[in-house]
Amino acid sequence: MSTFWKTKIPQIMVLFFLLTLDFALSSAATNNSANDSNEKRWAVFTGDGHAGDCQCQGDDLRCVQRLGQWDPWGEYRCSYSHERRHGLADKHAPAHLMGDHVHDQGEWMVEYKYMSMAMAGNRSGTENLSTAAAFGFSGTNMLVAPTNMTMEMHMVHVMYGLRDNITAYLMPTWKSLTMDHMRNSTFMPNPPLAGTPFRTHNSGFGDLVFGALIRLYEGCDEELIFNLGMSVPTGDIDRRTTIPTGGMMNQEFPYPMRLGAGTFNARPGLTYKVYQDHGSFGLQYQTDLPVGTNSENYSVSTEHRLNAWYSWLPWDNLSFSYRVESLWKSDYNGADPDLPPFIISTNRPDMRGGEWVNFGYGAALLVGQGHLLNAEFVHPVYQSVNGIQLANDWSLCVSWSKAF
Ligand SMILES: [Cu+2]
């Protein structure tokens, strides 16, 4: 078997596990609701003691109202109406994702999202390395090795329904990047600093993300949404710092400390969601593809993300999600001539790519008049990086949103 497929095995197994789990949960729920499960699925349930749970509207076969009481397993919830879905806590995908839902014509949504991602320690392939071992590794980190990094992002996400099936969105981003380093004991530019740590920081506007979400298909309890997304290079890639050399030299920030891609990126994606009586299930394929080369003669990683998640909805206003993500990133193309590759590994365009499998645990809460609070914690369970890079440790995303 080729090494390509060998490295894909954990991802494929995990996705298969999640699909199996979802079908098991969904068939268990169908069995629980016993009588008329067929009718219920197609939303013409008018039945028995729970008859008041649903009212159906003419021929469109969608439940528009649930008059039920406390219903911890959601067995009698009607999940088919998109109007109805707006009142449920799992109406959005887990917090780290976007492009998963559309709005009705004329409806606005405003969201504030905060993400913090931590990277800790050096890694090559699937092996962790000490800082001592990172110095000089593969002809880089000769002067300095990175040790930790934090990437914070503040995002304002505005959506507007142009048509019932077409929603436009705009998302300006603000980035705050912090990296810790250790100077090699043979550090030359400013010898008194040899063997000492230092921290660099860079913050400002990142790239501006916008696009349109086009619902290609809507069934009674499922929908398929295409994301015609892109980004424009509003993030600065030319900033400089004198901190590494203690003021001796003014150098450009290395690749991961830059605020944007420097290129226009295409960000097409596809999301499929299934609404069940007790929750919802989603699959998403999302890309980030730089177009051409930026002013510094390189282009950032092409990214492919495959996500599967399940949101369990024990109550209308509270849901819990479990998510699996497979992420593939290429190395950078080209190279910025201002970044000497031997100094530090973050100056190496051929040490940017890799493969990650992440698990995410989320919760969403609807409070007041439709305020949705969404939070998710993510950690990697598998990561294989090209060359030597900092290892991902964890990521947290929280958001507030409201549609009106
Ligand atoms: Cu929205």
Image: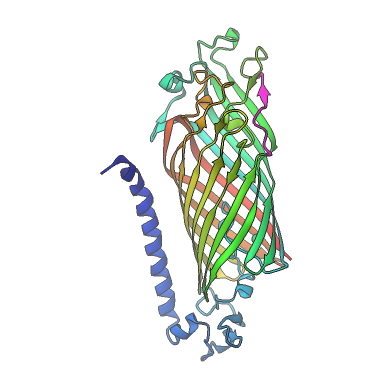
Farthest residue to the front: give it.
292
Residue 346: x and y, percent?
A: 53, 27
Who is closer to the viewer here, 304 or 141?
304
The region drawn magenta spans 234-243
Judge left or right: residue 116 versus residue 135: right
Farthest residue to the bottom: give it.
48
Residue 319: x and y, percent?
A: 56, 64
Q: Quadrant of the N terminus?
A: top left
Q: How many marks?
A: 0
Q: Residue at x 51, y 21 (%)?
A: 341
**Is residue 236 inside the magenta stretch?**
yes
Residue 122 visible in this rendered orientation of the protein: no
Residue 109 visible in this rendered orientation of the protein: yes
Q: Main secondary structure of the magenta part?
A: loop
Where 129 sits versus 205, above or below?
A: above
Q: Residue at x 45, y 87 (%)?
A: 36
Residue 99: x and y, percent?
A: 59, 57
Color scheme of the displayed model: rainbow
- Ligand 1's quadrant is bottom right
Q: Residue at x 52, y 76 (%)?
A: 220
Residue 355: x and y, percent?
A: 43, 41
